[in-house]
Image (cartoon, coloured by chain):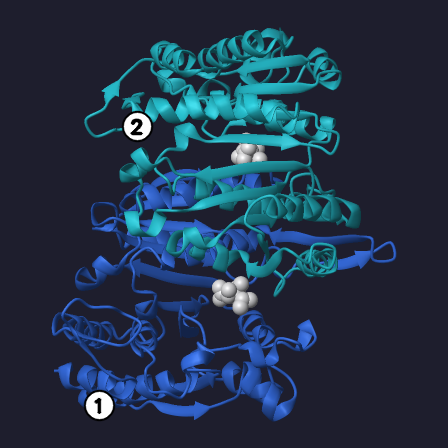
Chain colours: A blue, B cyan
Amino acid sequence: KQIILLPGDGIGREIMESAKLVLTAIAMEYNHKFTFHEHAIGGDAIDKYGVPLPEDTVNACSSADAILLGAVGGPKWDSIPVHLRPEKGLLGIRKSLGLFANLRPVKGFASLLHASPLKEEIIKDSDIMIVRELTGGLYFGQPSERRENGNVVVDTLYYHRTEMERIIEKGFQSARIRNKHLTSVDKANVLESSRMWREIVNEKAKDYPDVTVEHLLVDAAAMKLITQPNQFDVIVTENLFGDILSDEASVLTGSLGMLPSASVRTDGVGLYEPVHGSAPDIAGKDTANPLGMILSAALMLRYSFGLEEEASEIESAVNECMEQGYHTADLKLNGGKQVSTKKMTEIVLGNLT
Amino acid sequence: KQIILLPGDGIGREIMESAKLVLTAIAMEYNHKFTFHEHAIGGDAIDKYGVPLPEDTVNACSSADAILLGAVGGPKWDSIPVHLRPEKGLLGIRKSLGLFANLRPVKGFASLLHASPLKEEIIKDSDIMIVRELTGGLYFGQPSERRENGNVVVDTLYYHRTEMERIIEKGFQSARIRNKHLTSVDKANVLESSRMWREIVNEKAKDYPDVTVEHLLVDAAAMKLITQPNQFDVIVTENLFGDILSDEASVLTGSLGMLPSASVRTDGVGLYEPVHGSAPDIAGKDTANPLGMILSAALMLRYSFGLEEEASEIESAVNECMEQGYHTADLKLNGGKQVSTKKMTEIVLGNLT
Ligand SMILES: CC(C)[C@H](C(=O)O)[C@@H](O)C(=O)O
Ligand SMILES: CC(C)[C@H](C(=O)O)[C@@H](O)C(=O)O
């Protein structure tokens, strides 16, 4: 299997190293052959090649089986014109590979829930999968421009029916293999695109009679994530709503540094990255939490390679670290032992069977 | 002063009665003359006249000094075509009166904070004012339509520079009379409209050197509202981001039923309504919480009539109810005394000096 590594910026490089070590150990244990090729993206690519997404990177990713991404961005590139910013690398790679489905599991670790901003009785037992459309909507719709001498501006929320259909199907499929409850989030009382979205959800619902469907307005969803997070199973929504709600959801469990994400398309090719950012302030200090990146590698094994046993083994090894009381500086584990990025990686490696 | 009452649907009528009683008492005490005229909106107007916003209502509101709105909507009207739904009445009145600035104060009552989904150390001392643009953006932009035989859909995020300028100024003005910290929320790494927004915020900042400005991406804002709500003072943002973030913020303090809102324009005319909805399940049962509506009336006195002393008197009277341990069924006050809508209103009246 050809894996492209895009370490990117800030702590990206350190945590990528951790994921690579874990994958190498898994390959040895199960006799798989993973090859790794590293390419530049984001600020790293701007520094080396002057653009956030070099053609060479796109080409390498196009022929890969899966991609691991660390993180992109940082204050260093904040004053660059917007079309050359690090984030454009991320948006560009998603779009050019057609990675239309962003999957973000949000599940608390029992031993970390005390760090949640929410009361324990509210957050406990929550286990949410957010399925976010990733290559359409306001992010890519045209026109997106100034008009009338710069006095008017428009952005366009554009969707083709097929773009809605495939992500909504992904939502139903995710619900089917989980707790069979799908919450579709839209703003149908205001947006025409949301009304079309809701119609398609209702059509598709007929093909998934085993899945219960609920429609929720995006404003109501933003409230319910806080007041009753454990009432959700799978949430499916368009790009921008998904961006806001998945970030909102990511802080509920108190362990943002642990959260992985997957961006996939139908044939299994996918890009995997931790939910947290590039944290330039702690880059190179060997203090970053590598577990979000390691768990992203586990998602890669599951979704892109169908290696369920291997994925579960990594997840169990990470779980065990928590139970053993190890944590990095971002997590304040009561009475636990704080370790470095490298040490945490070694502990995960030691916990692999 | 001419005040139009739009009780609307569900519990709207009961809580409007409460606000009217309180305003009448204040008028007596201070020797003001308030005249009240009631008109139909939302489902109520659909039932009576077949449309959610009758012309007669618009005309009456146009010549009023201020408007009080109860709530609109309910399952009864859910199957009506979308352009005739109760919400269209609300959107229509905002737009036709040009009420471009939605002000939503979010401040917890000390005695109610225990009902917050957040831990007390996180939510305590938060005092946020959300300033949301209310008559532009995706809500009203054209085109908003199906294309290509219904296979494509677009909505348009449209802003004129002057629409951005006036709401951003409102944000700065609000910050100036509060704690002088303005958080401008946008999605400038993706949207052209957000980039123009950010430019205007930076321009206007020069006119308000006493106000500290911070830019925050909408996804980061959705996180920070949960993790550090007490780090905000004033938030200013466009219509849809404001819709999502203000609803998210409204559940943080655990007392949604207490929150008022104001929708105003530059000349002082405004529409005032509680943040909570029409709660059809408890309508007519004399159990609804009238305090959000009563506090909205206080905002009317402050913002539309400049009656600061009168507004403060109502707010103190409501505060006193909480300290006396009175609460309606929506609030679970430890060891307090649960009372009806009418009884709560009497207690507020009794607490007026
Ligand atoms: C960096 C940014 C463009 C991106 C997005 O909005 O999609 C990020 O917030 C994310 O969610 O991956
Ligand atoms: C009813 C709906 C159209 C409205 C909005 O989205 O503006 C409501 O959510 C609000 O915030 O007042």
Picture coordinates of residue B174, whole percent (x, y): 62, 43
- Kindly report the distance in space between the C-alpha atoms of the residues bearing marks 1 and 2: 59 Å
Give the amino acid at mark 2: Leu
Q: Is residue A32 above or below residue B265?
A: below
- Residue type, mark 1 in image: Asn
In the rendered image, residue A32, in percent from the top left (x then y), is placed at: 26, 88
| Tag 1 secondary structure | loop
Residue at mark 1 shares a chain with residue at mark 2: no
Residue positioned 26% across, 77% down in the render: A328
Comparing A133 with A225, the one in front is A225
Number of numbered markers: 2
Q: Nearer the viewer, mark 1 or mark 2?
A: 2
User: Which residue is labeled 2 in the image?
Assistant: B331
In the rendered image, residue B296, in percent from the top left (x then y), is placed at: 53, 25
- For disc 1, does the CB lie below 8 Å from ligand 1? no
Residue drawn where x is 39% and y is 11% of the image: B350
From this view, report whether residue B110 is shown above or below residue B285: below
Quick one: A19 or B279, which is closer to the camera? B279
The answer to whether residue A100 is visible is no
Quarter containing the C terminus of chain A: bottom left
| Residue A146 visible in the current orientation | yes
Residue B54: name its quadrant: top right
Q: Residues within 10 Å of mark 2 (few under 14, many from 20)?
A: some
* SS at badge 2: loop
Task: Answer with left or right where residue B140 lies relative to residue B184.
Answer: right
State which chain disc 1 sits on: A
- Callouts 1 and 2 close, C-beta under 8 Å: no
Rendering quarter of residue B57:
top right
Question: The residue marked by circle 2 belongs to what chain?
Answer: B
Instruction: State the residue position of label 1.
Output: A31
